[in-house]
Image (cartoon, rainbow, N blue to C red):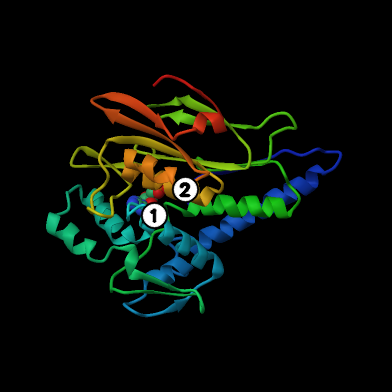
Amino acid sequence: MGTVVQIKVSIDPAKYGEARAKDAINRAFDEIKRIEDVYSLYKDSSEISRINRLKKNERLQISDGVFNLIHKTLDYSERTGGAFDITVKPLVEVWNAARKADKMPEEREIKRVLGRVGYKNVVLDGIVRAIHFKKDGMGIDLGAAAKGYATDRAVSILEENGIDSALVNSGGDMYCLGKRTAHELWKVGVQHPRDKNRLFLEIRLKDRAIDTSGDYERYFFLEGKRYSHIIDPRTGYPIGDEVVSASVIAADSTTSDILATAMCVLGEKGLDIIKNYGGIDAVLVTEERGHLKVRMSEGIRKRYDISEEKL
Ligand code: AMP
Ligand code: MG
């Protein structure tokens, strides 16, 4: 998945031997490798690549894991008014090609490709667990959700193996299982958006996921200007530079991964949307006229122990 995954577990050696803990960690890593094989866009044999070769109305039966993840992403597309949309794949390809050629894509090229984008053109059949696209030339890219999903799966494997305290970190996509010690929660930091050697937030969590998406994480240059790797599926263009970063806290990592990406597209409006969800919080950093501004979801300070540095 192009990232480093770190798993920490905390055990009482009197009750749970170190060898057993290592075994549990190895099983969790095996599951992450399995997920990488299933979700990879770069392996021709992956389930996602098979889906992406489908022609209009051609059906393919898919595994429960892939079905459920796609189902969840479609649900969040609906809830975010299409700001989150895994069918951005053809647009991601246009912008990748533009980056390689160092040439802005033509507006009419974007318009043409937009015709093949849209979560409403993905059809899932829950009875036979099949997928089909309503149009030719469509494709899905789970890059904005798969790391979180891998984190969740790793956590499940640890739990199945008797671990009740762990921290799984898939390239910043973190899940805190249980407490770090009997008296302390896990403490996670959010990197300063403009200085990677500093933290701007520290937050204590238990049985919660946190993920951050932002412009400082992954971007590319085109004709000398910097662009985000997150695309607004409604316009076909990379998101503007208003949102610097969005961190989302949720009950599972798949959700925090999806919503951190969605919040980058939605900006402040995203804070209004997550208000209605319950159990989801966010910290949004925006840049306005050269100044960084932090906004947090309502009640987040009551729910969590947060310490922050001024930006
Ligand atoms: P993340 O790093 O989790 O924010 O995910 C970003 C990746 O998701 C990009 O590299 C694209 O592959 C894909 N992507 C870009 N824009 C969107 C979007 N609006 N909705 C869903 N996936 C996207
Ligand atoms: Mg994401």
Q: Is mark 1 within 8 Å of ligand 1?
A: no
Q: Where is residue 193 drawn, in percent x and y?
A: 39, 30
Comparing 262 with 109, the one in front is 262
How far apart marks 1 and 2 lie (CA) works out to 10 Å
The image shows a total of numbered marks equal to: 2
Q: Is residue 129 left or right of residue 113?
A: right
* Residue 209: numbered disc: none
Q: Where is residue 277 drawn, in percent x and y?
A: 47, 48
Q: Are marks 1 and 2 in contact (CB under 8 Å)?
A: yes
Amino acid on which the number 2 mark rests in the picture = Tyr
Vertical side of 54 occupied by 69: above or below: above
The residue labelled by disc 1 is 79
Q: Is residue 121 left or right of residue 61?
A: left
Vertical side of 204 occupied by 237: above or below: below
Vertical side of 147 occupied by 178: above or below: above
Question: In the image as oriented, which residue stretches furthest toward the top?
Answer: 310
Residue at screen point 25% across, 50% down: 100
Comparing 80 with 265, the one in front is 80
Q: Is residue 41 visible?
A: no
Residue at screen point 28% across, 74% down: 136
Q: Secondary structure at mark 1?
A: helix
Question: In the image as oriented, which residue stretches furthest toward the right?
Answer: 14
Residue at screen point 32% across, 44% down: 266
Dot 1 or dot 2, earlier in sequence: 1
Q: Secondary structure at mark 2?
A: loop
The residue labelled by disc 2 is 277
Amino acid on which the number 1 mark rests in the picture = Arg
Q: Which quadrant of the figure contains the C terminus?
A: top left
Q: Where is residue 291 drawn, in percent x and y?
A: 29, 23
Comparing 175 with 205, the one in front is 205
